[in-house]
């Protein structure tokens, strides 16, 4: 932990949105030195103008994690300069907790403290970064626009006073340090001209939910640059293909670059600017190589740079996700020398080697590895693009994948600790946990009761299956808090009824059937009670689980299938509907302790194996969507040892994704993210089926 360093920020600006500052200090020698560093919201660390690190690993509200980084390999004889760029967003999001901005850093040599914030670093406001920009997405922060024409960014003009700010509670990083790979493309796949076309349809902004003033944004009239809406109204005219770099582009010309698969990290380019230039860069997870377009995802994938004459090397501050990118010259001319991405991803050098001879399965496996790496740089994320948010339930599947790939759970340790340290301020019922974290509550204080249940499953597996049993007591309060919260919604039969907020069974019409008693949720509850019993040995939890399990099976089964829900009639009597989902059948299989040898389940077992094809046209039936039903089906087929069926399901569902982007997607139809963390579980199911091993 820090011994002398103090958390500081620009005086009077720690609650100002999208504030970027730069700290600099000179040091004679970096031999045998290390830096301890933390910040809110994020930092980039440079030594002698070489990129060193991005961080910190995200933490629960009121806490901050400290990175510890050796500096010797960056040493230069004759003196060294350490530069820390800090973004203080001070806005609400789903990817960080709303917090005041700070940076805290300390450089040590053995037991000696050489430099530390609060004494040794000069501070400057960023001379390049435009503060008043549009939000990148509702879930993340702000888009990046740079005016890099200033020749002396560290002159007195930009020097600012700092103040010591309140320190958070310090935590160690826990998650493994990320890997950075420098990926460059040697050509533009398409070069052409463009012109404004007012008839082209376009989005002014993109967000998953409205971003009001309380959530944090600048008013449109305050924002001078709006590259997202500008780029969509430029009609492209492709003229040349596969042009090697360096490549000269003039005003009204563009180039499209292809990274060959989706990568996640910091977009970067170097250019010799021939005339003062304004360039807009758009990037996307998937596009045609000869015509750039944004994918259907709620974020604004743009950067804008105003550049002076001469050599320029530019890199985004935040990590983004792309396979294709376009550079359009609004003004001026430049020679593009390099274009690419510096990855930010989980370090996979310890990946456990597995032989997969089938080339298509190998492609799916490698795509799952890529997907995991992109979504586990510091916590488990749903996607590395729109949100970078740490969702429960998603994390249950990603946690299995991390241990499977690496034989350890370093990222999961940080992820789960954040939830364990969550302090409920009354925004949600006591004992309940957020649906994703570190994050802020949306205006309606939305949370997902079922995701609380998946938290209990994940904690059980983390503690009992992945070597962390010594931490059981650390998690007791959060696990039993969830149990206590759920107990409040048991009806006279002991079944959960009318759970609050956003009930989530899966992304299908099954979510419409959660009023009153939802049977898939009650099967899930059975599993949760057993999991809590496994952890803490409370026999009453086991007894309750058995009772609820038997009642749920009795009430829900109609001799051929499990019904999804029961609603109360005008007399208050619960009556089953005709609704049933494919996902609901897998909840029953996974948590209902169903003996398939019993004659009453003979028809149902046949349906399980063929995906309920006989009901495809039934009006009250809904097949599985990608999440969570498709993943429950994979688990179910593993449980049933139906390996051939599972392998064909995996090939059919995932192969096209792997071939197209080298990653696995949120949805089969291509909407949303094409690089989604939970999908890395496909590698686990694939290898277990190939090796014919049960994992449940």
Image (cartoon, helix red, strand yellow):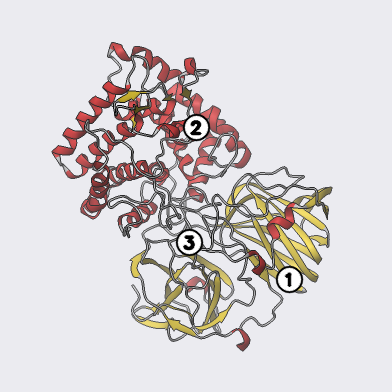
* Residue occupying the far bottom of the picture: 156
Up the image or down, 499 lies above or below 475; here it is: above
- Give the label, 3 or 2, closer to the camera: 3
Kindly check if marks 3 and 2 are in contact, taking CB atoms under 8 A apart as contact: no
Q: Position of residue 280 (x, y in %)?
A: 72, 60
Relative depth, front residue between 180 and 654: 654
Front position in the image: 688 or 657: 657
Neighbor class of circle 3 (other Cα within 10 Å; few <14, some 14-19, many 20+) is many
The residue carrying mark 3 is: 92
Q: Nearer the viewer, residue 12 or 514?
A: 514
SS label for mark 2: loop
Kindly identify which residue carries mark 2: 625
Q: Nearer the viewer, residue 301 or 137?
A: 137
For mark 1, what is the residue? 307
Give the CA separation, mark 3 to mark 1: 31 Å
Counting residues from the start of the chain, the first of labels 3 and 2 encountered is 3
Give coordinates of residue 635: x percent, y percent.
39, 31
In-image side of 506 versus 557 (left or right) = right
Q: Residue furthest top?
A: 599
């Amino acid at each position: 932990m820090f011994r002398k360093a103090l958390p500081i920020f620009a005086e009077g600006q720690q609650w100002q949105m999208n504030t970027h500052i730069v700290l600099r200090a000179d040091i004679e020698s970096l031999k045998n030195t290390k830096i301890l560093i933390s910040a809110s919201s994020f930092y980039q660390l440079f030594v002698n103008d070489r990129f060193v690190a991005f961080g910190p690993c995200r933490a629960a509200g009121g806490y901050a994690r400290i990175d510890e980084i050796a500096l010797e390999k960056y040493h230069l004889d004759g003196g060294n300069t350490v530069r820390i760029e800090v973004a203080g967003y001070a806005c609400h999001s789903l990817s960080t907790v709303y917090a005041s901005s700070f940076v805290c850093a300390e450089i040590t040599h053995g037991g000696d403290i050489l430099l530390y914030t609060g004494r040794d670093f000069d501070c400057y406001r960023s001379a390049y970064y435009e503060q008043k920009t549009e939000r990148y997405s509702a879930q993340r922060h702000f888009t990046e626009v740079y005016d890099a024409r200033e020749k002396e960014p560290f002159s007195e003009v930009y020097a600012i006073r700092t103040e010591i700010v309140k320190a958070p509670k310090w935590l160690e990083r826990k998650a493994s340090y990320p890997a950075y790979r420098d990926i460059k493309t040697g050509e533009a796949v398409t070069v052409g001209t463009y012109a404004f076309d007012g008839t082209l349809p376009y989005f002014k902004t993109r967000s998953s939910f409205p971003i009001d003033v309380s959530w944090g944004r600048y008013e449109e009239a305050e924002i001078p640059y709006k590259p997202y809406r500008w780029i969509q109204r430029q009609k492209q005219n492709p003229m040349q293909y596969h042009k090697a770099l360096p490549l000269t582009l003039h005003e009204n010309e563009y180039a499209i670059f292809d990274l060959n698969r989706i990568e996640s990290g910091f977009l970067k380019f170097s250019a010799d600017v021939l005339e003062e230039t304004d360039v807009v860069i758009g990037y996307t997870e998937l596009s045609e190589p000869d015509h750039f377009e944004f994918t259907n995802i709620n974020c604004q994938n743009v950067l804008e740079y105003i550049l002076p004459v001469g050599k320029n090397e530019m890199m985004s501050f935040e990590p983004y996700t792309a396979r294709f990118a376009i550079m359009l010259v609004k003004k001026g001319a430049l020679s593009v020398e390099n274009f690419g991405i510096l990855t930010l991803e989980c370090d996979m050098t310890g990946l456990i080697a597995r032989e997969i001879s089938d080339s298509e399965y190998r492609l799916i496996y490698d795509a799952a590895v890529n997907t995991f790496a992109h979504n586990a740089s510091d916590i488990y994320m749903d996607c590395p693009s729109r949100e970078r948010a740490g969702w429960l339930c998603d994390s249950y599947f990603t946690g299995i994948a991390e241990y499977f790939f690496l034989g350890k759970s370093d990222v999961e340790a940080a992820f789960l600790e954040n939830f364990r340290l969550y302090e409920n301020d009354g925004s949600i019922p006591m004992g309940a946990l957020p649906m994703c974290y570190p994050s802020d509550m949306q205006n309606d204080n939305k949370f997902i009761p079922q995701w609380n249940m998946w938290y209990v499953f994940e904690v059980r597996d983390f503690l009992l299956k992945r070597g962390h049993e010594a931490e059981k007591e650390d998690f007791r309060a959060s696990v039993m808090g969830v149990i206590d919260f759920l107990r409040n919604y048991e009806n006279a039969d002991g079944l959960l009824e009318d759970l609050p907020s956003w009930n989530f069974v899966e992304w299908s019409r099954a979510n419409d059937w959660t009023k009153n008693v939802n049977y898939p949720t009650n099967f899930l509850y059975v599993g949760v009670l057993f999991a809590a019993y496994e952890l803490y040995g409370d026999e009453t939890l086991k007894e309750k689980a058995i009772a609820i399990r038997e009642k749920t099976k009795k009430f829900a089964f109609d001799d051929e299938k499990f019904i999804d829900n029961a609603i109360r009639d005008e007399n208050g009597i619960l009556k089953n509907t005709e609704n049933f989902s494919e996902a609901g059948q897998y909840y029953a299989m996974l948590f209902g302790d169903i003996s398939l040898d019993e004659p009453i389940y003979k028809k149902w077992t046949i349906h399980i194996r063929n995906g309920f094809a006989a009901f495809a046209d039934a009006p009250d039936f809904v097949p599985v969507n990608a999440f969570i039903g498709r993943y429950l089906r994979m688990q179910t087929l593993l449980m049933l040892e139906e390996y051939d069926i599972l392998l064909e399901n995996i090939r059919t569902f995932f192969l096209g994704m792997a071939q197209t982007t080298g990653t696995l997607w949120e949805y089969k139809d291509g909407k949303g993210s094409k690089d989604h963390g939970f999908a890395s579980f496909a590698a686990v199911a694939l290898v277990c089926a190939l090796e014919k091993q049960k994992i449940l």
